[in-house]
Amino acid sequence: MKMKMDRMKRMMAVIVTIAMFATLLSGCGFLNKLLKQEEHALTDTIKNAVENAEKKAETSPDEEQGDEAEEDKTEDLVPEETEFSLYEEMSKWEFHFCSGAGGWETYLYVAEDGSFSGQFHDSDMGDTGPGYENGTIYMCDFHGKFGDCEQVSDFVWSVKMDELAYERTPDEEEILDEVRYIYAGAYGLEGLKEGESELLVYLPGTPIEELDEAYMEWIRPMHFGTYFGEDFEYVYDPPQDLPFCGLYNTVGDGFYSDNGAEHNGTYVVNRAKLPGLKNEKAELHEDGTYLYEDMDPYGMVKVTNACFFSRDEVNTYSDQEGFVRKCLDGIGVKDYDNLYVPDKDASMFVYDKMSISGEKCSYASWTEGSNEDSRNCSGCFLQRYCYNSDYDQIGWYGFVYMISQSEYADVIGGEATNFYLSSLELSGNPERLSSASEHDAASKILTQTVKDTDASSLRAQEVYWVTESDTDLIEKYHLDPDEFYDDYQIAGFTGDFSEYPVAEDCLYYVQYPEDKYHKLLNRKEFDAYISRYDSDGGMLMDFILDEKGCVVMVYEPYTP
């Protein structure tokens, strides 16, 4: 209430000032006429100001608290910027060192003061002998402290190893319950000298090209690759930036990390920005969960990118549909029908949407609304577990990236959005969460496109997709009704190509990429694709144009 009274007092002060100014003007002869001309307007101004002040004074405490609470709620959505602390950032992650081959692993937890603790373990159940018939286990519990840290670049820091101590002396042995325990060193930290040796810390968001190649040799076997298709082919699928915090022992060992207890630092983003979309909602919460919504001006196409935390039990492998429903419920999607989650056999047809930067995800489609408000929806759903310092699973983060489109969407819709869903990746940079583009999407044309040596343009001719029901086009282009073998014909091609200007960040999606997986190409790759597959008449491509006629998106339509 005090805030409202203060506002009223300031308003009354303005009114008094106006009145005093009016008195001064009335004492000046040459201004007296002007004052009378403005008298009615001034009186109305004072009257309105008084009425507004009275209304504000009558505002109830409950209404006032509601307004202030809403303001506080909005402010809480985006974390306040604070002075960066490297060890505080590292404390949010659980570090692992392993190769993916064998059962050995070192895990490490870092506290906000730079102290750390962890464990190494390995086993060889075939290594037996008198008294240890159940095999041999190698392990160690260790603790220590990182010291001074120095920023090397925007995303890379160097830290000193000040202390490293073991609970049991390395190489010490004992037999317990017919198992031989050999106490070892902390694999991954061995070779470091206290007070001298340095490690590199790669923050989430570090560009992949800035990572040391020796570090990547440890990371690749565990991340950024997936098997797909009927032939179970392997494809390397690295993101543009590191989606977790990395720790690199410059002796040659590299740690990756998972989300720590109840804090998310990994984001699902799209490699591309979809033309025509503008950001409508951007909520990034203190715990790293988020909700972003991007939409075209008419609401025809909407992209939702969200992350939520859950403790509910759900198995993504045995019950994918249950997992998808849990995710939709987690982001507030309640009213939907016709949910379709491909089974193992059907997933080969949407393989490009079954993995994000090497992590398996689920794909689903469904409908929302009815009649004129009906919308077709599809999305990718990812689950990432998080653990506490005792390595106990305490919950999981659900990631949902979905596209909803009206049945009336004509420029961006159908195949365009289907392609767009295939270019997702993980990221450690929350500034990439929005899918909004700087470009509008004004029109779409079908073209026959040929290779152009000029990267700022494309040579193409507009053509028309004609079906058996398009009687006017059949007559106009003198098409033979008996030649609709695949229910369509392409009409209007004469070989008279035109130059179409192309945006520097134009998107290029194709049906049959060389690696069979990455359908989003850069311009150099697209030119090579055109050269590899086109005939004298070029290749069939859809162009999305902005209001100035510039090409902002190209995609290859499916042709039976």
Image (tube, grey):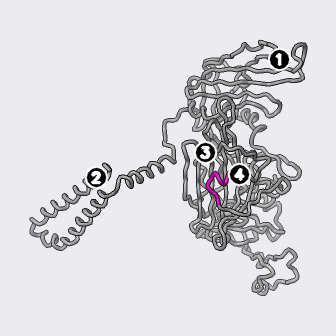
Say few, some or many: other residues with alpha carbon within 10 Å of mark 2 (under 14 / 14 to 19 / 20 or more): some
- Asked if disc 1 and disc 2 are in contact, CB closer than 8 Å, the reply is no
265 above or below 451? Answer: above
> At which x and y percent is residue 512?
81, 59
| Residue at the spot 62% in from the left edge and 53% down from the top edge | 331
> At which x and y percent is residue 81?
49, 41
| Magenta segment boundaries in residue numbering | 327-334
The reply to whether residue 242 is visible in this rendering is no
Give the mark nearest the N terminus, 2 or 3: 2
Q: Which of 364 and 39 is in front in this view?
A: 364
Q: Is mark 2 on a helix, strand or loop?
A: helix
Mark 4 or 3: in front is 4
- Residue at numbered disc 2: 5
Quadrant in which the C terminus appears: bottom right
Mark 2 or 4: in front is 2
Label 1, label 2: how many angstroms apart (C-alpha)?
77 Å
Label 4, label 3: how many angstroms apart (C-alpha)?
19 Å
Q: Which of 426 and 153 is in front in this view?
A: 426
- Residue at numbered disc 1: 177
- Residue at numbered disc 4: 381
- Residue at numbered disc 3: 429
